Amino acid sequence: MDKLTFTPLGSGQEVGRSCHVLSFRGTTIMLDVGIHPGYQGEEQLPFFDHVNPADIDVLLVTHFHLDHAGALPYFTERTGFKGRIFMTHPTRAVIRLLLFDYLRLMEIQSQSQSQNKANGGENDNSSSKSPQNSVLYTEQELKSCIEKIELIDFHSVVTVGPIKFWAYNAGHVLGACLFMIEIADRHVLYTGDYSMEDDRHLMAAEIPKISPDVLICEGTYGTQVHPSREERETLFTESIGDVVRGGGRMLIPTFALGRAQELLLILDEYWQANPDLHDVPIYYASKMAGKALRVYQTYINMMNQRIRLQMDVSNPFQFQFIRNLKSINVQDFDDSGPSVVFASPGMLQSGVSRRLFDRWCTDPKNGVIIAGYGEYERSETKRTACPRFSCERNVLISHTQAKLSITPLPRIWLKNPTRFSLSRGSSSLCGAP
Ligand SMILES: [Zn+2]
């Protein structure tokens, strides 16, 4: 009997490193290839040793987030993988920038680990990993990997051997897609992360007309009901307003692309509506600030009607109150009054966001919003910094709220599935769809 096998190599009962393998009649497809943001070095990787990379025919990447795409250069350049890689145009444009930024972060972490070891290892929490192992790919490997990516348009059918697949818009982040895979007249739908409502710039996920035989569905907090987008935005903007009106500084650690653009749109609009805040600077500190802006401007035709209508008046990504900075020199940073700073990395492991956090965290007037994805419970911030964080006004937007765009699939998708699978989350979630 023909048998379809599904093997999660990560994210089965955890949040992070989404990576799954589907096999049917000798064809093998990998779905996403993420890292676990709560670990470092090779510990972040999916469990690749459960498969032979040389057997993978096709690798489909749903979107640019590191927990879905961060292990891509490692997998294509350092294993025996020889298959084809597909993703949408904006996903590749952003992945190129994001993975370059992530490489720089890994190099900084590796250097600081080496220094710690040289200083006797007092603050070294990197277990026995060597610094070389903590950097998952080189710049050359990243370039080589990016060149191998093949691009797909939404709805265009691609045939590779006995399988066909095509992509639907998933909302969530720029370029994100759901994949429908047709194997021997059966349909498998793999969602990745998706959003069922419009956000500031993106449309909601499309509902495929074909009812899949097998649904592999993102299930992070899939059984919880989240506050509305309006409530979340109000919590975000008012928390920032409270801190800066009280004379404090608000730090928003975030990766330079993705969530940052959504939050910048919200905050710029809030500043426009509140003239008393106009003198309070908002800094978007990223080496990639300019490049990120150009990528978002390039793909404005793929965004929702609200953004396209705004384009008729002025470019919504040409922010009125946000100052793009290539970087912040934390020592020289003019820090005399209230401000809002977006700085990477998103989980405060090191770099500008961490240095600002260390500088500001003892003043109760200041605040921090953890808005990035990742598993806060495992983050280094929680382990090492939070005991020293005495700020009364701190606001934590955790994974739940940062990913609030994820809501349970509407029933229409579940019409006749012969199998139903939730990826991520606890076993109790997975077992009770
Ligand atoms: Zn995502």
Image: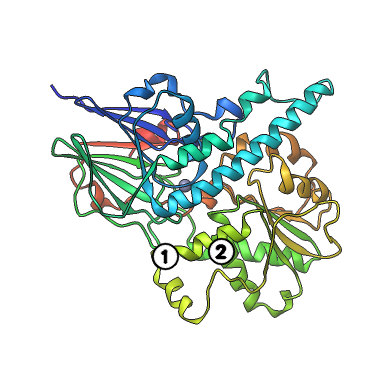
Whether residue 123 can be seen here: no
Quarter holding residue 53 = top left
Residues 335 and 328: in front is 328
From the image, state whether disc 2 or disc 1 is nearer to you.
1
Question: Badge 2 is on which residue?
Answer: 233
Percent x, y of residue 213: 19, 40
Position of residue 356 measured from the top left corner of the image (x, y, whole percent): 77, 50
Please tell me how crowded label 1 is: few (under 14), some (14-19), or many (20+) other residues with Cα within 10 Å: many
In the rendered structure, find residue 91 and report the number of the disc placed on it. Answer: none
Q: How many marks?
A: 2
In the picture, the quarter occupied by the N terminus is top left
53 versus 148 height, above or below: above
The one of 413 and 124 positioned closer to us in this rendering: 124
Whether residue 233 sits left or right of residue 379 in the image: it is left
Give the quarter of the image for residue 150: top left
Q: With 211 as the anchor, is 120 left or right in this view?
A: right
